Amino acid sequence: MNNFEDRSTEQQVRSKITLITFILSLLVIWIHTYNLETYGIDGSGGGLDKFAWLLETTWSAFIGIAVPFFFFISGFLFFRTFRFTWDGIKSKYISRIKGVVIPYIIWCTLYYLYYVILTHLPRVKDIVNSEPVPLTFIRWLDALWPHEYYTLWFLKELIILIALCPLIYILFKNKYIGAIILLLLVLNSQFGWVRIPLGSNIYYLAGAYIAIAFKSAESYRNKLLTILGCIFLMVLFVLRFRFLDNTIVQLVFFVAVWFACDIFKSDRNYPWWMKITFFTYVAHDIFLELFEKIFLMILGKRTLFALLDYIFVPLLVFAVLVAIAAFMRRFTPKIWSIITGMRS
């Protein structure tokens, strides 16, 4: 049977999205594990020092794509089922209040309390590199617009973009006008003509444009595009992802990954622990920060330990998150549903 049919089934599309978002959630953990500066590794040495520097700089050049890719997928998924009617807009807002806004407030609060505790603990506060965080109502309000609580800035920008959904739809409902608008935004991102708020808006809007202008585009399959996508990814790998911080290259990367995944043509229902993407994103930093501080405090600053930290701590963090998720899904399903935005 030909592995490249004209259309993918809905289950194949869902499986592809699950696989991609699962991988991206793991990459986000690695983004925050970068530790060369902490361990004083600058690549000037030889042997293990040089290897650690090459590994982390190469991998970091790649994993930086995770958050832009998340914005792209978020924009696409939101507008994939969007209806420009009062009931359609109302329904979307209600679902996103439950799915994004309420969990955002909860997790901002949890991170705020976490840093309050962490910066007041003996011994631990000395290696946190932060002034003691006061426990006050005003400081809590400040935490809802995250600055140092950097992990949640993604949700903050996502909420703003969701609020603008009627305007986004109006701009993109005509595919030709939408293409011109998107092109101007891409060029502006390249050349910096005008400073536009929400630095990652271009990725969200690109995903939104595809969903609005090209209905059912996610089901399209093409053997040539799959081959070209794989070649593109291999070239990036050979170049050590050197140009992956470029907006145009990133947008091409999203499309290349999407078609490259068609090699597998999977319609399997992946296990639940591959679908805890939201929980992984919002909760990983609590445990990552804790484990890395303990790791550093016990083992000290040696290159070998920097490598072990960078390679294995993200996997340990994810394993802990899976264990917590399994426990909560089993024993506190209502709390689990609320803090993950009604996700299973």
Image: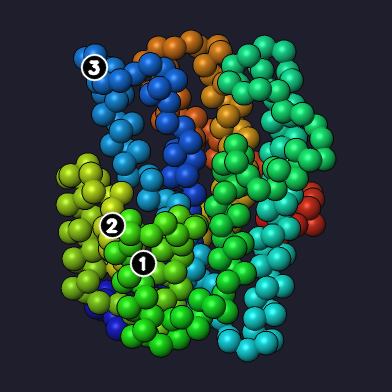
Q: Badge 3: few (under 14), some or many (20 or more) residues near its Cα, within 10 Å? A: few
The answer to whether residue 344 is seen in the rendering is no
Q: Secondary structure at mark 1?
A: helix
Q: Is residue 33 left or right of residue 154?
A: left
Give coordinates of residue 114: x percent, y percent: 71, 33
Name the residue: 36% across, 67% down: 185
For the residues marked 3 and 1, what is the alpha-carbon distance in whole angstroms? 39 Å
Label 3 sits on what residue type?
Ser
Residue beneath disc 2: 191
What distance separates the C-alpha of mark 3 from that of mark 2?
33 Å
Q: Is residue 280 left or right of residue 117?
A: left
Mark 3 or mark 1: which comes first in sequence?
A: 3
Q: Any mark on residue 44, and which? A: 3
Residue 1: x and y in percent read: 26, 78
Picture quadrant where residue 238 is located:
top left
**Relative height, residue 129 to residue 12 (above, below):** above
